[in-house]
């Protein structure tokens, strides 16, 4: 396989959905007694109880390459990583790997709360396949990286969640495998530590010529770290190309879901369509620029006193803003027909990150709640100006207010 | 340390294919041998945390059982014990029994209690039940020390036969491992087996010659010999209690055969189902 360290050929993974599952021995016995002629493993594609989490995945990765795996939730990213790290086996196809595989699927796997930080470093290292001598040689480096020197002999159950995650990442990052598999680990910890982790990953890939497979929803991290990406959608590899090409395809894919259109069978008053017009197109909104949200309300009969509102929800599922319009103030929907309501936010002050909308249509006071449309029209807020020293991070805050500093020294 | 990695024989190719577990299974097992040690060490270390009496619990149980069995079998049922003091007879039977029951209950529950590891990291799953055996062995040394004390108290001194004790320790462990492999793999799929093990052990302590001698029950001997642990217990007593006991070759070889069958089939079933553990655990 020459320079390739990972060769994936026609790999698929099928799961059975929980329709015919025998969780207890009795169920199994009863099933066997009732229908002994039924085969327990039915083959074929028409079986509604089976589900292909991955299908026909073929790609290769060269030594020292950093490859990103992106896709929406449920696209099969985690399943692919589980196959590569040999936790579960494929249903079809073949995977060839060369070298030790280290996976950071979930930081802190194998940590025991009663054991001290020192003991957990050894335990976790062994779980990840390190030799005791190897762990001992890297011990100081791990402790220093995790910044837990003072608490190294304290049981980890007394650690703060930040310390816990730092220690766990530190152990895994010092594993020095030939192939490192990283799944969303950067979603935890504070911004400074995330930056440190990213730096460490970069160092592992470029400095030490290791191969890294990187899964993240953080597109900024993907674009800085990887050179090539695999885009997964519904279990299939839709595109395998250089990172910028794949990121564009991915953003287009997100954009297609960014306008909401009501299902055809709606007859009552309802929210017919929602569209977000971001300042940079492609669902990308620049900080400080204008954002327009248009909502079309269908009302074949008049709504007594309509109220339309929407919330902007951030990636941590917190509502950040709420905007509303009452028919009392701005008459709408008092006659049969259709109304388009457009809300313009002249200067977006949302922090960087991804957002979605939650739209409410109701008939207050005392009237009925007509419709709730949630989790639609995803868009991303970016900042184009020079980042502060720690970079723009979605975790830093929810919102940036205009402010002015006055610094006086004595 | 930042030198580029070299592809050499030290970095073999791994092929992952459906319906076929790793070709390098036994080498992987060897590679992960330290994990076996660490898992056992974790379990030993954590077990008596926040327990005031700590490791004394490992001794309390056999002492109470010894007193109880001496009273029930020796005093109430008036079972013969030959030239051996009854408490010592019970304790020499408890040694392999405790080893077996700790190893069996530990290994049969081992996969489910380590499910967070199984579903997140790859390593040869055999490590998990094996580490449970190591934990049982640690407890065994406590009881062995207790036995040494009791033996000195009754002025029963060891002979050359003591050197053969490891053979019977191994025998008890292999029986437990064989049954444990079956049970732990079955428990992954059918949690029913979690309830079977305590029941099995509860009954087992009475149908196993822990509290009585087999050689004074000639009529029952063939029946008792069907229990694979009988050979191990007879062996323990032969090693520890000196000339009062005779070596029963037939019970030993019967035990050995049962152990071998259990182990071979257990290993087969474990390996056959191992690939799916992460999906169904």
Image (tube, rainbow, N blue to C red):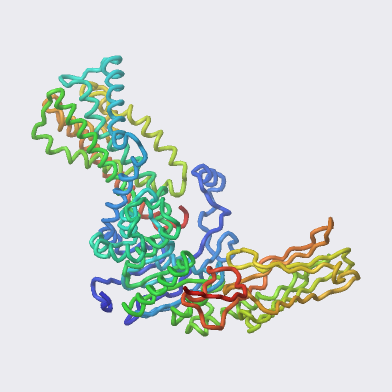
Q: Percent from the top left, x then y, of residue B59?
A: 27, 32
Q: Which residue sits at x=36%, y=33%?
A: B201
Left or right, B58 with reference to A291: left
Q: Nearer the viewer, residue B166 or A34?
A: B166
B130 to A191, vertically: above or below: above
Q: Is residue A92 visible?
A: no
Q: Give the image location of residue A257, x and y in percent.
A: 65, 74
Q: Quadrant of residue A301?
A: bottom right
Asked if residue B159 can be seen in this view, the reply is: yes
Looking at this rendering, what residue extends furthest in the left direction? B160
Residue at x 51%, y 64% (from the top left corner): A14
Q: Position of residue B209 (x, y in %)?
A: 27, 27
Q: Position of residue B217 (x, y in %)?
A: 24, 21
Query: Residue drawn at (16%, 37%), measured in percent from left and top?
Result: B165
Say how many tags the image has.
0
- Is residue B86 toward the left or the right of residue A337 in the image? left
Quadrant for the N terminus of chain A in the image:
bottom left
Task: State left or right for residue A84 relative to residue B212.
Answer: right
Q: Is residue A202 above or below residue A108?
A: below
Q: Observer-nearest residue: A183 or B121?
A: A183
Q: Quick one: A373 or A189, which is closer to the camera?
A: A189
Outermost residue to the front:
A410
Q: Quadrant of residue A171?
A: bottom left
């Amino acid at each position: 396989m020459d320079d390739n360290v990972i060769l994936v050929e026609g790999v698929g993974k099928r799961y059975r959905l929980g329709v015919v599952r025998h969780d207890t021995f009795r169920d199994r016995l009863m099933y066997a007694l009732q229908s002994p002629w039924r085969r327990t493993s039915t083959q074929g594609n028409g079986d509604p109880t089976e589900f292909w989490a991955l299908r026909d995945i073929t790609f290769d990765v060269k030594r020292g390459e950093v490859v990103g795996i992106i896709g929406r939730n449920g696209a099969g990213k985690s399943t692919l990583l589980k196959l590569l790290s040999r936790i579960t086996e494929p249903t079809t196809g073949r995977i060839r790997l060369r070298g030790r595989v280290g996976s950071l699927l979930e930081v802190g796997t194998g940590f025991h709360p009663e054991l001290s930080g020192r003991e957990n470093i050894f335990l976790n290292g062994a779980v990840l396949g390190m030799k005791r001598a190897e762990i001992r040689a890297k011990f100081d480096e791990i402790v220093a990286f995790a910044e837990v020197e003072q608490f190294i002999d304290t049981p980890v159950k007394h650690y703060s969640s930040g310390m816990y995650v730092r220690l766990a990442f530190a152990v895994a990052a010092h594993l020095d495998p030939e192939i490192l598999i990283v799944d969303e680990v950067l979603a935890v910890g504070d911004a400074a530590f995330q930056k440190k982790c990213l730096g460490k990953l970069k160092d592992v890939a470029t400095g030490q010529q290791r191969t890294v497979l990187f899964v993240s929803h953080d597109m900024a991290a993907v674009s800085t770290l990887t050179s090539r990406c695999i885009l997964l959608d519904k279990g299939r590899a839709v595109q395998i190309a250089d990172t910028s090409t794949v990121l564009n395809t991915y953003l287009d894919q997100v954009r297609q879901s960014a306008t909401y259109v009501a299902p055809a069978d709606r007859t009552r008053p309802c929210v017919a369509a929602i569209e977000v017009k971001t300042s940079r197109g492609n669902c990308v909104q620049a900080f400080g620029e204008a954002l327009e949200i248009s909502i079309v309300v269908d009302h074949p009969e008049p709504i007594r006193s309509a109220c339309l509102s929407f919330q902007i929800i951030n990636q941590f599922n917190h509502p950040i803003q709420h905007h509303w319009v009452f028919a009392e103030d701005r008459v709408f929907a008092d006659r049969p027909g259709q109304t388009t309501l457009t809300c313009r936010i002249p200067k977006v002050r949302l922090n960087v990150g991804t957002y979605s909308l939650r739209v409410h249509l109701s008939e207050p006071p005392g009237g009925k709640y007509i419709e709730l449309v949630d989790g639609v029209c995803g868009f991303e807020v970016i900042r184009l100006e020079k980042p502060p020293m720690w970079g723009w991070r979605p975790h830093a805050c929810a919102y940036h207010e205009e402010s002015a500093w006055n610094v006086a020294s004595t | 340390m930042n030198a580029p990695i070299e592809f050499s024989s030290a970095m073999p190719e791994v092929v992952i294919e459906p319906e076929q577990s790793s070709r390098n299974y036994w080498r992987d097992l060897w590679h992960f041998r330290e994990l076996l040690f660490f898992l056992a060490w974790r379990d030993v270390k954590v077990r008596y945390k926040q327990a005031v009496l700590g490791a004394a619990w490992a001794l309390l149980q056999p002492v109470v059982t010894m007193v109880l069995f001496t009273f029930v079998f020796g005093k109430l049922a008036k079972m013969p014990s030959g030239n051996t003091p009854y408490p010592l007879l019970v304790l020499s039977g408890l040694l392999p029994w405790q080893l077996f029951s700790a190893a069996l209950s530990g290994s049969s529950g081992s996969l489910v209690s380590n499910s967070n590891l199984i579903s997140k990291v790859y390593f040869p799953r055999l490590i998990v039940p094996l580490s449970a055996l190591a934990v049982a062995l640690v407890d065994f040394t406590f009881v062995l020390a207790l036995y040494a004390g009791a033996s000195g108290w009754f002025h029963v001194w060891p002979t050359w036969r003591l050197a053969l004790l490891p053979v019977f320790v191994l025998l008890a462990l292999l029986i437990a491992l064989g049954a444990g492999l079956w049970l732990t793999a079955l428990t992954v799929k059918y949690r029913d087996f979690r309830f079977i093990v305590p029941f099995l052990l509860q009954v087992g302590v009475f149908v196993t010659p822990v509290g009585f001698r087999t050689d004074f029950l000639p009529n029952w001997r063939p029946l008792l010999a069907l229990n694979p642990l009988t050979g191990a217990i007879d062996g323990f007593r032969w090693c520890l209690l000196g000339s009062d006991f005779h070596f029963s070759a037939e019970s030993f070889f019967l035990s050995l055969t049962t152990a071998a069958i259990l182990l071979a089939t257990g290993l087969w079933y474990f390996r056959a189902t191992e690939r799916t553990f992460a999906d169904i655990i």
